[in-house]
Amino acid sequence: MESFFNLNLLSDFLSTSLRLSVPLAFAALAGVLSERSGVFNIALEGKLLAGAFGAAVGAFMFNDPFAGIAVGMLFGALAGTCLAVLGVTFGVNQIVAGIAINIFVLGITAFLSRVVFGAQANTLRLPGFLRFEMPYLSEIPLIGPAIFSQDLLVYVMIVCVVLVHLFFYRTRWGLQVRAVGENPSAADSAGVSVAGVRYGCVIAAGAIAALGGCYLVLSQVFLFSEHMSAGKGFIALAAVILGRWTPVGALLACLLFGFFDALQLRLQFNYQEVPHEFFQMLPYLISILALVGLVGKPTPPAAIGKFYRREAR
Amino acid sequence: SEFKAAAVLPGSITDQAFNQVVYEGLMKAKADLGIEVAFSEKVKQADQAEAMSDYARRGYPVVIGAGGEFTAAATRVSRQFDDTLVVVINGSPTENVATINYNNPQFGYILGFIGGKMSKTGNGGLIAGQEIKAFVDIAEGFRKGWKDAGASGEVTITYTDDWDDVAKAKEATLNLINQGADVVLPYLDNGIVGVVQAAEEKDIWVTGVITDLGKSSPKANLASTVLDFASATATAIAMAKDGKLERADFRFNLGSPEGHMGTISEAVPADVRAEADALIEKMKAGTFQP
Amino acid sequence: MQRFVNSLIFFKSVFAVLAALIVGSGLIAMTGKNPIEAYATLFHGAFLDYWGIASTLVKTTPLLLAGLAVILPLRAGLFNIGAEGQIYIGALFATAVALYVPGIPGPLHILLCTLAGAVGGALWALIPALLKTYRNINEIIVTLLLNFVALHLVSFVVSGPMMEKGAPYPYSEEIPTGVFLPKILPSTDAHMGVLVGLALALIMFFVFRNSWVGFSLQTVGNNPRAALYAGMSVRRHIIISFLVAGALAGLAGTFEVLGHRYRLFHAFSQGYGYDGIVVAFLANLHPLYAVLSAVFIAGLRSGANIMQRAVGIETTVVEAIQGLVILFVAVSLAVRYRASAFAGAMRRRQALDNDLASEPES
Amino acid sequence: MAEYKLSLEGITKTFGQLKANDDVNLHIRPGSVHAILGENGAGKSTLMNVLFGLYKPDTGRILLDGKEVSFASPRHALEAGIGMVHQHFKLVGPLTVIENVVLGSRDDGAILNLAQASRKLVDLADRFGFEIDPDVPVSKLPVGMQQRVEILKLLYREVDVLILDEPTSVLTPSETRGLILQLDQIRKAGKTIIFITHKLDEVMEVSDRVTIMRHGRCVEEIDTAETDARSLATAMVGRQVVFQVSRTKHDIGDTVLSVDGLSARNERGLMALDGVSLEVRAGEVFGIAGVDGNGQAELAEVITGLRPKDAGDIHVDGRSIADASVAQRSREFGIAYVPEDRQRDGLVLSETIARNTILRRYNCAPFQHYGLMDRKAIGSHAARLVKAFDVRFQSLQQIVADLSGGNQQKIILAREIDTEPKLLIVAQPTKGLDVGAIEFVQKQILGQAERGAAVLYISTELEHLLHVCDRVGVMFRGRITGTLSAAEATPEKIGLLMGGVAEVA
Ligand SMILES: Nc1ncnc2c1ncn2[C@@H]1O[C@H](COP(=O)(O)OP(=O)(O)OP(=O)(O)O)[C@@H](O)[C@H]1O
Ligand SMILES: Nc1ncnc2c1ncn2[C@@H]1O[C@H](COP(=O)(O)OP(=O)(O)OP(=O)(O)O)[C@@H](O)[C@H]1O
Ligand SMILES: [Mg+2]
Ligand SMILES: [Mg+2]
């Protein structure tokens, strides 16, 4: 228990928490963006994976992590486009479309990774982003090492959250997104292009979620492995709801999740005699408790998951 | 007719670990013996019995299930198909089924012993996907060896709940390192990569138990044993072809062609090596079992 | 006429499957295998071969029951993403009764296990239902999170208290042979569970269509305010629909254990609960179509397995093709509104006849 | 300048088999107020939706300033200077008033400046005598307020052509006056207004020209100066309309409903009812007047059991109904209720007509036996109701959403009245109805009183109240500020009470 109060350990612990939440946060932010426009995004998992694969391909081909980001975001955006075409234009049930995309991405990335990387898939060490210490800031005790000596993508994530927040509440288009997600017919009558807004949001969401995959590959493990998203997209989905469909809320939810995931690793260490499954349940149980504890009810965007067709009433 | 062998694998044949090694053994048998082989990878647990019986039905005289979780299904399949020999790797001894096992505590022990000698902090860490018997045996041996080496601290275990999640494995390792472990042993599939990366970054030792990490990571590898499932698989198939594989439990000890020491780091001093060698000899001779 | 329209709609899905397979054949060709041979194997293996049919039926059972567990609450406007967790807890309860309540004659014991499984699933579903009704907490997230909790709970149980001594892998002891579900195809794994699933689908269809329970459930789903006004208790509907859904999913887990696994394995479900969502939507929330879509997905899976074994096609290709098929079928179902405008017109026509026929004489 | 600001030529629009607009021609002069009249379901809203780019016509063309235009979406219509107030509000509930107002407008650049927009909006509202708080979420506003937001949204955009689809249906008389005066000014500024309403006096007052639609066709177009309300009504309905439903004398019996010191809260937790007491006797029609949002809706909801009470007591036939459920109140105590918001509360829009007619009796005989629905009984019941209430529909299996507003209202009324209730509560039953339908609805309600039911009639339309009620209670801020008998009630007296100016004992 003593180790908990050791400043270095604590700061390492916070740093682990943050790192575990970054991919979640990108995905959750993407979820917020697309669900606020009324498109349910169960495809986050697939987008993360597509992004991870793209990042690996880009970094491998061009030997440059920025190329990895570019290709990763492109692949994510493609997955997003696919969801938009199916869900917004064709009116395919968005959950089914999302699940189908997940399954497809899982198969195709595994298949193509064998084609692209061949046998070296798992020994490869791709160029990536390294942690750097911010001058002065990183010397602040506790949070300095935890927050101010991370790599580029962590800061990109924080900037993205702030940008999406400002976009939602300070810009004309953000207002349009919120309106489309609540009442597309009203937004339509006010001169907002419902399909346009949804396409924009879902494709952008694909690119943002892909950044989470880029982080996995370019900042964490420097290689691509099959199904490396490992269910993070679904946790992100929960974080979207826990964060009440707001960018900042979703980030907090992801941090909470990352915190308890890091904590469960630590608790396993400290209490070897307790069955580890109980610690592994912890992040999920805490999330449920957080929901119970929060006051007021979370109300999803009213039009979420609904196909909008003008002449239907 | 021509001899055939099939393997059913729970994971991906490119996982750099268990599944890949068994797959390689199958390919080795194909090349060495000139037989026909088939395999199914990433077979979900629910489909394992079905996959094995399907191969049996297709007339494969040998069907291999890669992993202890096949034991239950194997019993039923071999009951149903008299002409097929069912082989389970890491299975628990079962009537009518050939099981291939390693003397896991020995492998864990020797790594734990070397690790314990070399640890500065006295703390070691083990990382596994799930709590399966093979790993528990290795862990037990590792702990014993660690203690016998006279290390001061503890050996702790972390389960990641995912054999392939590289990022999670890496974070779990970093956590162990933060808590003071400076020798870690991964028992994972794809996840091993994450463990090795963390070890390299934090400049601590890793010990490999299944594959020789000295080949992929000479810098961080302290010592590796090789549970050469590939050879074991190929050996089993060859024996089966000659009709010599019995429906019983096979156990490979440390020091056999199928299970032996791998690379040991230059950093390990000669006296420790000598002590280790002596222990290995004793285990081989059967005078010592951890 | 109506039937003709329906069959057109059905065939549209068939065309979609064909289209997906054509796209997928590109992938197969990339691996150097012959797509036609591969597909012939898939189809034959899934629906024509005795063993293949058995394997399709085995997979159909949990898919169908999980699908029904998604459909029912959705009628009342609630999303049950938690079938997966309910499957685990149902299986846990059933296994416990199978292992620890001895000395009961076989059929009765099976019944008892089945009941226990249903109760287990229902209890697990009760948590989100109560949180929804009394705290208005989003049921999607609670059911999703509880899946992970259930997974770890079962994992704990089978690697701890319930674990078979010396087992190489986390699983429980084998259940007594007396509680094995009877087979429907001799010497295969195909068990009776699929018949139970079918019966339950029929019952659900009948209840939705003909009973006032179906009426009120649908009213609650369509307009809860109007439901209150109609004197329906929205809370009670939420709770009951979740309880029943949980029980259905619990049965899926139970039949996995009693039907062909014969023990409780760690992480045994591997996504049946999530597959249930696909089944439900491909069936357009219709209990009878759910039978079709469950058989379809099950066939795809078992056929794909056989294709992998017989032709040696990599699983990754098979996975990608499965995704393609679901995508294409989903698209074909969505493009239905043209057809359904037609179907709607037909319905109105027919209804008009009904109107005329039953107009009270004056 | 072209002779016509707008011309619609040969517009046809079908839904399934229904021709909602059938070769409609409409010509609107610049700077005029053009009224469109027609029964419920005549196709007025459909025509306007076509004009506004929401619906795509099957055939026909639209000319704006003499040039052919085609609007792919409302955005194009707005860009061409055409704006519309919809009959069924197009508001985004969780957004605030000001956010709804600026939504989609493109003149303030990328960054929202809500403060500045709010000032502009408040100025605008002041000019109309509308009181509005720009920062309240729209969903928290009563219906009347929402109507105002809809109108302000349009005015804020400063379009050239204003389409107003029943803008006055939930406004108070004084608000209606404010709007009409403003419309006059707008016209004087050279703008063109299309005005849809069912209130003939409004037509007579504001419009320059009137088009009358029936069954999807234009049947008449005439200068307002050349006609009068009575002939408009006749042209519209196709028969003579009695304007004042006259009350026949009937006996007033024992007390049916007695409400005592009733208090309750609204969704926001604020006191909506504050010690209301009243009594309604058999055969009596008791009217509740008041500006929308003063507790009328809550009163009805508490009596029917849809809203919990904080204090007070309710008796029906001398028995307390405090512990009775909604279903018991309806079935055992005979309380029937026609809610104000028919689409939100009274109907399941996506269900068939047949099923909606049994909504409140779905599990009672004869519609079910042993848990099973009796389709035949349901069908013949529905067929009887739609016939008796003259509902215009295509099939009983049609979903209610496809009916026009008036016909939806008739279905609710039919369903409620058919149970022969002891107490009938009706809230805004004539909202959005055409004159013919109003006459019909009022007759039905009076018929219930004559049969011996006690009727609680909530309405913001004073004239209707004065025609129908024996007594009128006026609500203001959750209290009944005065009760007047039919004889003593005048619009002036009630108007004073509605503003909370006087409290009459
Ligand atoms: N989207 C739609 N789908 C199907 N039918 C529709 C649709 N919109 C309108 N209708 C039908 O078209 C006809 C005309 O409706 P419309 O709303 O234009 O009438 P209205 O004249 O505005 O009536 P009201 O005075 O009640 O508002 C009605 O029978 C209505 O049921
Ligand atoms: N004009 C009519 N006269 C008599 N019976 C009718 C009439 N219109 C409808 N019905 C019957 O009333 C029943 C109740 O309608 P409802 O909408 O509940 O049908 P349903 O249960 O939805 O049927 P379906 O499953 O075919 O859609 C109808 O099934 C039909 O048999
Ligand atoms: Mg209208
Ligand atoms: Mg129907």
Image (spheres, helix red, strand yellow):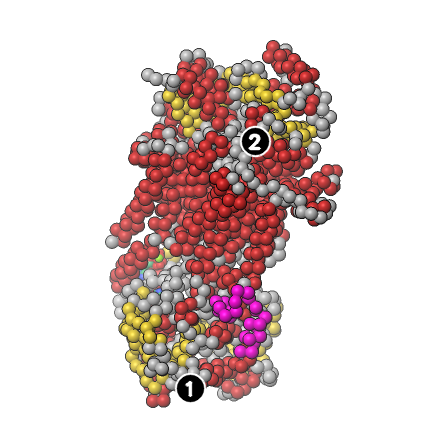
Residue D112 covered by magenta stretch? yes
Q: Which mark is residue B192?
A: 2
Q: Quadrant of the C terminus of chain B?
A: top right
Give the crowd class for mark 2: few <14, some 14-19, many >=20 residues within 10 Å: many
> Residue at coordinates 38% horizontally, 50% vertically from top-left?
C284
Could you tell me how far apart the alpha carbons at marks 2 and 1 are, in whole angstroms? 84 Å
Count of numbered marks: 2
Q: Is residue D39 left or right of residue D107?
A: left
Which residue is rendered at x = 38% and y = 77% of the image?
D434
Q: Is residue B152 above or below residue A296?
A: above
Visible in this render: residue C100? no
Q: Depth check: give the residue in front, B226 or D250.
A: B226
Q: Are marks 2 and 1 on the same chain?
A: no
The residue pinned by badge 1 equals D205
- Circle 1 sits in a helix, a strand or a loop, which is it? helix
Question: Which chain does the residue under circle 1 lie in?
Answer: D
Dividing the picture into quarters, in which one does residue A15 lie? top right
Observer-nearest of D146 and D323:
D146
Q: Is disc 2's CB within 8 Å of ligand 2? A: no
Task: Report x, y in % for residue B34.
Answer: 38, 18
Image x and y of residue D492, in percent: 53, 87
* Residue count near mark 1 (Cα–Cα under 10 Å), binned few <14, some 14–19, many ≥20: few
Q: Could you tell me which chain the residue with mark 2 belongs to?
A: B
Q: Quadrant of ligand 4?
A: bottom left
Q: Which mark is residue D383?
A: none
Residue at 54%, 78% in the rendered image: D125
* Magenta segment: D100-124
Can you tell me whether the CB of the residue at mark 1 lies under 8 Å from the nearest atom of ligand 1? no
Residue C304: image location, x then y, percent: 37, 35
Tag 2, which secondary structure?
helix
Residue C216 locus on image (x, y percent): 44, 56
